[in-house]
Image (cartoon, helix red, strand yellow):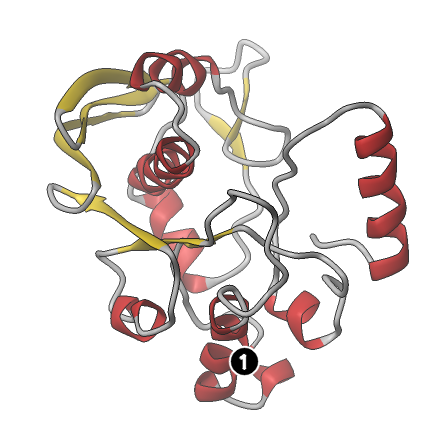
C-alpha cells in the first residue's frame, strides 16, 4: 500500500533523477488520514469503487467515504504544474459515483459497463481472461485481457481512462492492456499437474471473495 511520506518523497526524488515523468500511486484511506501523501500534488485522481473495508479504523462508513473523498476535494486546490490539468476519473457504475462527482476538476472521465467516456461492451468472461470492446469517444477497439474477472475489466477501464486523459492513443492502450499479466498473490493459478484448480488470491473481505468465486 502507500508508503510513508518521507520514504515516498525519497523514491519520487529518485524517479525524477532517473528522468521518470509519471508516477502512479495507490492511495489508501489510511494513507490519506495519516498524511502519507503529504507534499504530493496529484494531477489525476481515480475512483475505482468503495466497499466496507477498514470501517473499524474510520469509525463507520460515512467517515470512510469522506476520507476517500478528500483525494478528490483537494485535487482542484492542489499546486498546479504548467499546462497540466486536474483530472477526475470515476467508476460510473459504483453506487457512490455521485459523491465523488460533486468535486471540482478541470476534466472528468466516467467509465463503466456500456456507458461513460470509457466503456466496455460485448463482454465475454472466461476463467483464463476476458474479451470486450473498449469504446471511447469517436473510436472503439477489441481488447483481449489475460486477467480474469469483471473486476479486472473495471480496472482495465480505469487505466484506459487515465491513458486517454493523458492523450495516449487507443492503439497503445490496447497493446498495453493485452500485455498485462497477473501479479503473485492476485488470482495466481498454481499448476503442479494436479487434477483440480488451485488459486492463490488476497481476497480478505466478503465482497472480494464473492468477486473471486464468481469467476
Q: In this view, does 72 lie above or below 114?
A: below
Residue underneath mark 1: 55
Residue 93 location, quadrant: bottom left
Secondary element at image label 1: helix
Residue at the far bottom in the pictured view: 59
- The residue sitting at 45% across, 78% down in the picture is 65
- The residue sitting at 29% across, 43% down in the picture is 214
Q: Which of 6 and 215 is in front in this view?
A: 6
Query: Picture coordinates of residue 113 (x, y %)?
Result: 17, 43
Query: Picture coordinates of residue 13 (x, y %)?
Result: 86, 40
Q: Quadrant of the C terminus?
A: top left
Query: Picture coordinates of residue 47 (x, y %)?
Result: 42, 57
- Classify 10 Å Cα crowding around label 1: few (below 14), some (14-19), many (20 and above): some
Direction from residue 60 to residue 142 in the image, left or right: left
Residue at the far front in the pictured view: 82
Q: In this view, does 117 lie above or below 63?
A: above
- The residue sitting at 40% across, 20% down in the picture is 177
Residue 30 location, quadrant: bottom right
Direction from residue 160 to residue 121 in the image, left or right: left
- The residue sitting at 25% across, 71% down in the picture is 98
Q: Which of 81 and 143 is in front in this view?
A: 81
Query: Picture coordinates of residue 90 (x, y %)?
Result: 34, 55
Amino acid at each position: 500500500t502507500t508508503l510513508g511520506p518521507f520514504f515516498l518523497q525519497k523514491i519520487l526524488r529518485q524517479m525524477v533523477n532517473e528522468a521518470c515523468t509519471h508516477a502512479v500511486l495507490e492511495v489508501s484511506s489510511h494513507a490519506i488520514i495519516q498524511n502519507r501523501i503529504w507534499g504530493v500534488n496529484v494531477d489525476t485522481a481515480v475512483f475505482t469503487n468503495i466497499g466496507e473495508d477498514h470501517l473499524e479504523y474510520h469509525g463507520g462508513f460515512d467517515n470512510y467515504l469522506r476520507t476517500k473523498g478528500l483525494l478528490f476535494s483537494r485535487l482542484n486546490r492542489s499546486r498546479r504544474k504548467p499546462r497540466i490539468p486536474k483530472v477526475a476519473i470515476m467508476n460510473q457504475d459504483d453506487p457512490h459515483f455521485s459523491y465523488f462527482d460533486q468535486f471540482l476538476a478541470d476534466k472528468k472521465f466516467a467509465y463503466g459497463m456500456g456507458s461513460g467516456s470509457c466503456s466496455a461492451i460485448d463482454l465475454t468472461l472466461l476463467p483464463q481472461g476476458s474479451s470486450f470492446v473498449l469504446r471511447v469517444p469517436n473510436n472503439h477497439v477489441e481488447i483481449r485481457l489475460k486477467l480474469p474477472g469483471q473486476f479486472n475489466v473495471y480496472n482495465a477501464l480505469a487505466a484506459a481512462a487515465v491513458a486517454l486523459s493523458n492523450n495516449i492513443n487507443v492503439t497503445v492502450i490496447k497493446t498495453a492492456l493485452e500485455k498485462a499479466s497477473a501479479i503473485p498473490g492476485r488470482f495466481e493459478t498454481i499448476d503442479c499437474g494436479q487434477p483440480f484448480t488451485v488459486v492463490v488470491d488476497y481476497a480478505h473481505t466478503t465482497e472480494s471473495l464473492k468477486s473471486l468465486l464468481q469467476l
